């Protein structure tokens, strides 16, 4: 198992200069998806206290400095956490530090999955985009109040697939079955041997 990344660059030259000779490089690194035991244990999330105040959180680039800083803050917090939920300046959820967030919220017609909308600055991701298309994950601005009502949650990215969330800020989520089912669906459809 591993991850192949293809990077396209503007090549040599000053920033914002015309692109004369674009560059391309490929990297490969071993990556192992979570084990069944890790999926059943789930991630512990914390809502980060310092919001992201810029306008480039959702942009894809080779610079992960902001994401790594958010992850380090989550892991160094008072509540033990594997990942951090990043908020914007208005207090709405952008994503997790190193992945997209899906939450299941109760409504009048049942429990439905949502992820922050891309227009809000949420980072686009291959896994969450695929789940939007094939599993009906909707988009919605997620406030702190929404996070307190979450019954299930998952973190997604290309390294972990769909990782269930067991706790948010120490509060145990009542239903791990929804993200576990989504994780199994993802693995069966995309990771066929």
Image: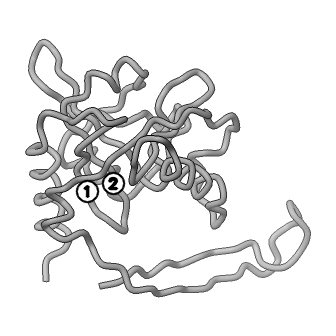
Toward which corner of the image does residue 45 lie, by quadrant? top left
55 over 82 or under it: above or below: above
Q: On the image, numbered disc 2 is attached to which residue? A: 156
**Left or right side of 23 for 82:** left
Label 2 secondary element: strand
Query: Which residue is painted at 22% across and 32% down in the image?
Result: 104
* Quarter of the rendering containing residue 167: top left
Identify the residue shown where x is 47% and y is 41%: 78
Nearer to the camera, 51 or 18:
51
| Colour approach in the figure | one colour
> Which secondary structure lies at badge 1?
strand
From the top left corner, tell me how far across and down residue 67 is, in percent: 58, 54
Question: Counting other residues with Cα less than 10 Å from the Cα at mark 2, is it few (<14), some (14-19), or many (20 or more)?
Answer: many
Choose between 67 and 12: the one closer to the eye: 67
- Give the image location of residue 70, x and y in percent: 57, 49
Residue drawn at x 13%, y 12% as measured from the top left: 108
Q: Quadrant of the N terminus?
A: bottom left
Q: CA distance from mark 1 to mark 2?
A: 5 Å
Residue in view at x 13 percent, y 26 percent: 111
Q: Residue furthest top?
A: 108
Looking at the image, do the residues carrying marks 1 and 2 touch, with CB atoms under 8 Å apart? yes
Name the foreground residue: 160 vs 128: 160
Q: Earlier in the sequence, mark 1 or mark 2?
A: 2
Taking the image as shown, residue 146 lies to the left or right of residue 193, namely right
Q: Where the C terminus falls, by quadrant?
A: bottom left
Outermost residue to the front: 78
Residue 157 x/y as whole percent: 37, 59
- The picture quadrant where one finds residue 138 is top left
Residue with the mark numbered 1 = 162
Residue 64 vs 108, above or below: the answer is below
| Residue 52 vertical position relative to residue 31 in the rendered view, above or below | above
**Label 1 CA crowd tier, 10 Å (few <14, some 14–19, many 20+):** many
């Amino acid at each position: 198992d591993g991850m192949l990344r293809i990077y396209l660059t503007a090549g040599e030259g000053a920033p914002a200069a015309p692109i004369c000779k674009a560059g391309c490089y490929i990297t490969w690194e071993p990556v192992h998806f979570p084990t069944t035991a890790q999926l059943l244990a789930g991630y512990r999330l914390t809502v980060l206290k310092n919001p992201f105040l810029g306008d480039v959180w959702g942009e894809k680039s080779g610079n992960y400095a902001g994401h790594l800083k958010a992850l380090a803050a989550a892991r160094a917090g008072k509540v033990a956490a594997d990942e951090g939920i990043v908020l914007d300046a208005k207090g709405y959820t952008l994503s997790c530090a190193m992945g997209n967030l899906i939450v299941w919220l109760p409504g009048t017609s049942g429990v439905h999955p949502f992820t922050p909308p891309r227009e809000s600055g949420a980072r686009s991701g291959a896994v969450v985009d695929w789940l939007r298309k094939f599993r009906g994950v909707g988009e919605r601005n997620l406030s702190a109040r929404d996070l307190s009502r979450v019954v299930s949650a998952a973190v997604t990215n290309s390294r972990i697939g769909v990782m269930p969330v067991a706790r948010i800020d120490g509060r145990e989520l009542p239903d791990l079955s929804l993200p576990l089912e989504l994780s199994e669906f993802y693995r069966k459809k995309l990771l066929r041997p």
